[in-house]
Image (cartoon, rainbow, N blue to C red):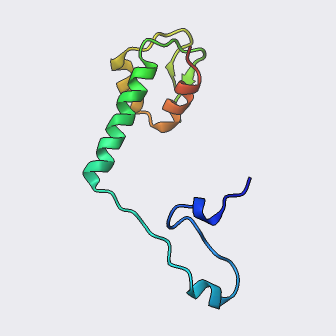
Amino acid sequence: MKKSLEEFSPGEVETRGSKEANSQVEPKKTFHFSTTANQERVNDLDRKQDELLEGKQATKDIVNSQGETVVTEGAVLTKDEIDQLKRHGPGVMVELSMNVK
């Protein structure tokens, strides 16, 4: 289903075609958030991830980028373990998030 022009938010619409058409369109707007606001969002996501993983059981072994097993199948995750696993990077956390019950 296509959106009508009114359904697009400012800065979401791009035009293609002649230079004349492009000169009549407002440039895309960029929204900047303060570093503090961004950090608050990251912290909120981090807390939510902790809540979702804590007490869950790994359904398979999880390995880091060096091939080392960092979580064994059947392990029940604690807050401290989750904090340690975050140091292995986002790949480990994504894999872990997809393989818990």
Rendered view: 89 above or below 77: below
Up the image or down, 40 lies above or below 83; here it is: below
Relative horizontal placement of residue 56, taking residue 17 as reference (left or right): left
The quarter in which the C terminus is drawn is top right
Determine the residue positioned at 48% across, 13% down: 56
The residue furthest left is 36
Q: Which of 28 and 70 is in front in this view?
A: 28
Q: In this view, does 37 lie to the left or right of 72?
A: left
Residue 37 rendering spot, x and y as whole percentages: 29, 49
Q: Residue 81's quadrant in the figure? A: top left
At horizontal 33% and vertical 49% (from top left) the residue drawn is 38
Q: Where is 2 relative to 47, above or below?
A: below
Question: Could you say where residue 66 lies in the image, as x and y percent from the top left?
Answer: 53, 34
Question: Horizontal and vertical percent for residue 11?
Answer: 51, 67
In the image, farthest residue toward the right: 1
Q: Position of residue 78 (x, y in %)?
A: 38, 14
